[in-house]
Amino acid sequence: MNPQVRPALIAFLTLTVLTGLAYPLLLAGLARMAFPDQAAGSLIRKDGRLVGSRLIEQVFTGQGDFWGRPSATLGADGQPLPCNAANSGGANLAPGNPALRQAILARVAALRAADPEQPGPIPVDLVTASGSGLDPHISPGAALYQAHRVAKARGLGEAEVLALVRSHTESPQFGFLGEARVNVLELNLALDAIPAR
Amino acid sequence: MVPPDLAQYALFLGLVLLATPPAGRAMERIFTGDAGFLERLLGPLERGIYRLMGVDPKAGMDWKEQAWAFCLTGLAGAAGLFGLLMLQQHLPGPPSTPSLTTPMTWDLALNTAVSFATGTTWQAYSGETTLRHATQMLGLVTQGFLAGGTGLALGMAFIRGFACRKETRSLGNFWADFIRGVLYLLLPLALLLALALVGQGTVMAFRDHLALTPLRGGRQLLALGPAAALESIKNLGSNGGGFFAANGAHPLANPTPLTNFLGMLAIVILPAGLTHTFGRMTRRRDAGWMLFAVMTLLFTLGLCGLHVAEAARSAALPAAVAPGPNLEGKEVRFGLAQTVLAGVASSNGACGSSAAQPGSFSPLGGGVLLFNMLLGEVAYGGLGTGLVGMLMAALVAVFLGGLMIGRSPEYMGKAVRAREVRLAILYALIMPLTVLALSAVAVATRAGQAGFSGNPGARQFTEVVFAYASCAANNGQAMGGLSANSPFWNLTTALAMLLGRFGTGTLAFALAGALAGQRRRPRSAGSLPVGSLLFGGLLFCTVVVVTGLSFLPALVLGPVAESLTTFP
């Protein structure tokens, strides 16, 4: 037998215990102590009921809600199931694929139909599927674009909704890392908290 | 380029530059016998492991012993992981069996085992629908450390081949390099990075998929798990396989721009630092910095190319949509710059941890990723393997340079004779032979074509070349338009991964052995100035031209043809 066989097997076994068991367990313990909410998945409760994770997109299609990014996730049966947080992924369509063009045209038509009075150009992130299918954010432009529709459906002043969008806009980290963004679930929760008139 | 994007790239490159000397010094210290306070803390554990293994960490090993050790550790890991995957339905713990909807076939298990044991981490499965948490931890996290650590040990053996002054057969002790690299470098860094990730929102919980009722009703099944443990080592060990299917795009894996930025630094800093370790151990720091400079130039060109390609308006957008970058398959928090940074760092770094879906990149954007992988991943590159690849190119460059000026070629005082050139050329040929031969088989057979989706023809060809390039370069990134979970794809990509890891690895050990067998000659007026800009230019051209000559036809048929037909 080659003299390196035994060390190779023992190295594999000892490092399995050390890096595959001890390291994750130690990390889990430290993480739970230092960052309990984040380690558990940044879950959000409303009136004591679990309503989601602030990092995971949910389906919003109502006139009075801000919509998130198109999601191309599939169900266990292989059929489209948007925002399926148990099977992440994107559409993987190439820019030259006619199916992508068709999907984008359908999203454009749906946005236009939902708010015919909003003539402005549609922000790119509202008509393109995200990489994870679970992107919890939209760009500030995409939120502002929808403010008119949301305000009208909820009977709120547009200025009030715009102010809410601004207060929910996260800047790039440290002012320059990544992009400014709006968390759609948190924005809709904040809208729900405004008493109806 | 707009200023904020430019600032992110500049800060990244600046931090890599600043971190290279300390990282290089730290690695020199760890691998020459003094790891500081960590050694006082973990020294008994280290010695206990050697005792169990039955090895003397001070005993020198020649190149054959090192190559056996490298390959056998990989094979032991692959065999162990294969067994774990085949048995995982009997393992306890979440997620519960109904959530695991992808069947673990023998070919998928084999592919996954080879993939993680070679540091490729090509994933033909979706983490959240296929694997138990126990498998992800015991299997995949462990392989992240094993593959990273053995790659690092390969790099150290290679450096010693250049550094030794007298003729010797010894390249150091593989087991000592491997165990010390894991204990004193990867493990502490992985723990620190993982904690930082959790602080930003990366999930680290041992619980089943959570069924919840979303705000507007219905039902959402939320996959959770000990993701942070894998997400940190996947980047540090230049493996890349993520916990969730969407990998670095998943908000519970890579929740903020900062986590993305730190992850990309984790890919780059150790391989970049190794150039400095090389310079210090060979006492030719100028030569180390020249390798660093060529790597940085290749990396920067990749950033520019990918940025321009993805900043352009997508051909799929109608006029009603506002101007903006190609956001299909990308995440809003990362936008253009963080996606480009992740794409370039991971495609150059033997690390498939993309922050977006390369399957939806523009034709030329996907082409930039492909080109980076085909270069052999030398722009900082994989842990240990990146430096090896760049030094191999340097040997070819001095051979060419020597021929041009009529001097006998030598590098770092070591003559580049027929044996060295033969090994370096064989090393350079593994990539084109593997990628082109397997791509030809795939596009010519029905079993290969069965993986195609509805993307345009030239794109399908790119997807095929991309898959084999990614596997042969031990990268692991995929253009998701290709359905690769079938016996044909699982077995052929596994073959590419094995050749790309153990084929190139064995040649690298053999070359290191040949160099160590030579006395190191002092510098003289006849030596090639390997720290000069002229040599840097020669090295850069060698890397690009060798790749270009091998792959130009494939690149023209794939990304170039697609870009010409997509933008009429």
Image: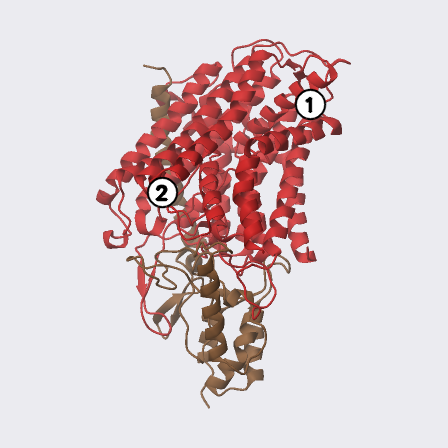
How far across and how far down the image is residue B156, in percent? 54, 24
* Tag 2 residue: B137
Colour in which chain B is shown? red
Mark 1 residue type: Arg
Q: In front here: B402 or A179?
A: B402
Q: Is residue B43 visible to us here?
A: no
Q: Earlier in the sequence, mark 1 or mark 2?
A: 2
Tint of chain A: brown
The image quadrant where one finds the C terminus of chain B is bottom right
Spot occupied by residue A41 in the image (x, y as percentages of width and height): 40, 59
What residue is shown at x 36% (from left), y 42% (from top)?
B137
Q: Which residue is mark 1?
A: B284
Q: Is residue A35 above or below residue B86?
A: below
Type of amino acid at the residue the image marks with label 2 = Met
Is residue B264 shown left or right of residue B290? left
- CA separation in Å, label 1 and label 2: 41 Å
- Is residue A78 placed above or below A119 in the rendered structure? above
The residue most toward the bottom is A197
The N terminus of chain B sits in image quarter = bottom right
**Residue drawn 69% across the image and 12% down it:** B408
